[in-house]
Amino acid sequence: MRVRGGLRLILAVALLISPPAPAQTVRVLVQSSPLAGFQYYGGKILWDEMREGDRLALIREPDNPHDAHAIRVEWRGEKLGYLPRAENRDVARAMDRGTPVSGRIGRLVQHPNPWKRLRVDVLVGL
């Protein structure tokens, strides 16, 4: 499931609503994307340790020479890959504005196609 146009609306609402107390932070799923580059980074080695629902760090790489909107995906400090270029622009803009954005493993599937092995859920804090 990808939410593209809806992401802008949710991000706009998130910026207008005053944040609740830290103990009551609400996170909204705004995007679910395949992990780009799974076959090149730590995913193969770490596969047996990862679980659906595990927290993922989303890290902006504005100086990435291949993509100015690059968002690196890490699990426990290990690089797994990137949000796909076709799906990272709105998330990068939100992160650049300071919107609280986080990630989690949405789905893990044993599949020969590396683009279908891991889904990254992108969440926005309200």
Image (cartoon, rainbow, N blue to C red):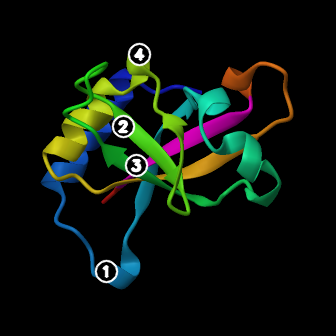
* x and y percentages locating residue 56 in the rendered image: 52, 55
| Amino acid, disc 3 | Leu
The residue carrying mark 1 is 22
Question: In which quadrant is the N terminus drawn?
Answer: top right
Q: Earlier in the sequence, mark 2 or mark 4?
A: 2
The residue carrying mark 4 is 86
- SS for tag 2? strand
| Amino acid, disc 2 | Ile
| Amino acid, disc 4 | Ala
Most foreground residue, 6 or 108: 108
The residue carrying mark 2 is 71
**Magenta residues, start to end:** 117-124
The residue carrying mark 3 is 58
Above or below for 20 versus 46: below
Above or below for 75 versus 89: below
**Mark 1 vs mark 4, CA separation in Å:** 32 Å
**Mark 2 vs mark 4, CA separation in Å:** 12 Å
Answer few, some or many: residues within 10 Å of disc 3's Cα (few below 14, many 20 plus, some between 14 and 19).
Answer: many
Callout 2 touching callout 4 (CB < 8 Å)? no
Answer few, some or many: residues within 10 Å of disc 4's Cα (few below 14, many 20 plus, some between 14 and 19).
Answer: few
Callout 3 touching callout 2 (CB < 8 Å)? yes
**Mark 2 vs mark 1, CA separation in Å:** 25 Å
Residue at (73, 56) in percent of width and height: 50
Q: Earlier in the sequence, mark 4 or mark 3?
A: 3
Instruction: Give the mark toward the camera: 1 or 4.
Output: 4
